[in-house]
Image (cartoon, rainbow, N blue to C red):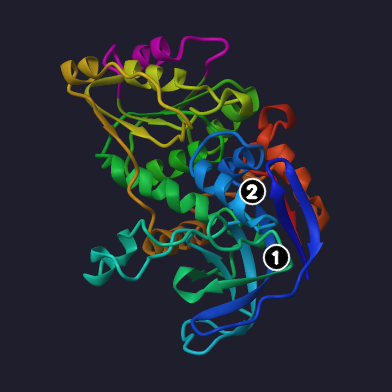
Amino acid sequence: MKAWRFYGFNDLRLDNISPPACRPGHVVVKVRCVQPSVTEAQLARGIKTLAYERIKKRLETEAPVQLFGHEFCAEIVEVGGGVSKFKAGDRVAARAKLPCGSCPLCLSDRSSLCRKGPVIGFDLPGCFSELGLLPEIALVKVDDRISNSEAACLQSLSDSVAAVETAGIRVGDTVAIFGQGSMGLECLQVARNCCAGKIITVDVRDEACQKSLELGADASINAKQDDPVAAIRDQTEGNGADVVFECAGGSPQQGLSGSKTLNQAVDAVRSGGKVIGVSWFGEPFSVDIDLLRERSLRYLFPDISTLAHLEYTVRLVASGRVQLKPMITHVLSGIESVPQAFEITANKGKYKAISPAQVML
């Protein structure tokens, strides 16, 4: 089969390799749609972010190696022994993080919270290939009302669901969201489903601000034109938002904001409010802890997304409560298009992309 393998950072090649052999507890799938996450697009270029050291070590010791591709939709073509939930012909999406099976959490029936197990695309081969081998415990069945393109976004949406759950939004809370890429727009829609009151979004791109208004934001601020902190306080009678999601931080090399939007989020939240840190930054930065303490702020990070979160995303999208199709702006054809998908995803501002670029196989 054809599969993309990394020989080093910035060195991705389409190789012919042996197809995966099915084994107990696993299924072989034919990949229908796959997209690089923003994190994967950074790692492919050697930019420091989540799992950088792990990927660097694998490239130094194992290359060529199949990497990335945990956001996908695939069709099962073969099931291994012991697989009971799925059959050939089922379409599936996957939770990226798997339980290790041996830690105290796993041994106490809380394996969904385990962080020691392998990650699809990072430790196990992902789906930048014609066929893939996936463990049954990672999978959910895709509803017939969901397209292959939408299904490839479900894993990202499950992380956004976990972020909103962590926020503990109360009825009528004012919510502000910095960054209107895929996760920002997902948090917007999930927060709306979780009884948020006014929702205010912030981005630096007109197309992203417009998209957030189309998907339910009450107001959207272009931070290149207006001071977002002043605008949020003006729209909240000077108090600030009850909950602020920070979804824009990260490497400026990828058009992200560094730590600027985190500082703005802290200034835009009301005293006693919550800042939800969705972004990955890739390096340490300074935070004025005394300011957070003096204002009784809570800086929270999303809980790990579980299979239950992923199953919930299927219901959200199938029922129309969350719309993914309007966020999908770039769809490419053929496995040969994978490098172009990485390029677009790594430079979304340049290509006016909202979500990662997708490849239909």
Closest to the observer, 132 or 158:
132
| Local SS, label 2 | loop
Check contact, mark 2 vs mark 1: CB within 8 A. no
Measured as percent of width and height from the top left, residue 223 is found at 53, 15
Quarter that holds the C terminus: bottom right
User: Alpha-carbon neighbours of circle 2 within 10 Å: few (<14), some, or many (≥20)?
Assistant: many
Q: Is residue 356 above or below residue 82?
A: above
Amino acid type for the residue under numbered disc 1: Arg
**Is 226 covered by the magenta stretch?**
yes
Quadrant position of residue 76: bottom right
Residue topped by disc 1: 32
Q: Is residue 106 visible?
A: yes
Q: Spot the residue most to the front.
A: 61
**Is 108 covered by the magenta stretch?**
no
Q: Is residue 68 visible?
A: no
Residue topped by disc 2: 36
User: What residue range appears in magenta?
Assistant: 222-241
Measured as percent of width and height from the top left, residue 251 is found at 55, 27
Q: Is residue 10 above or below residue 72?
A: above
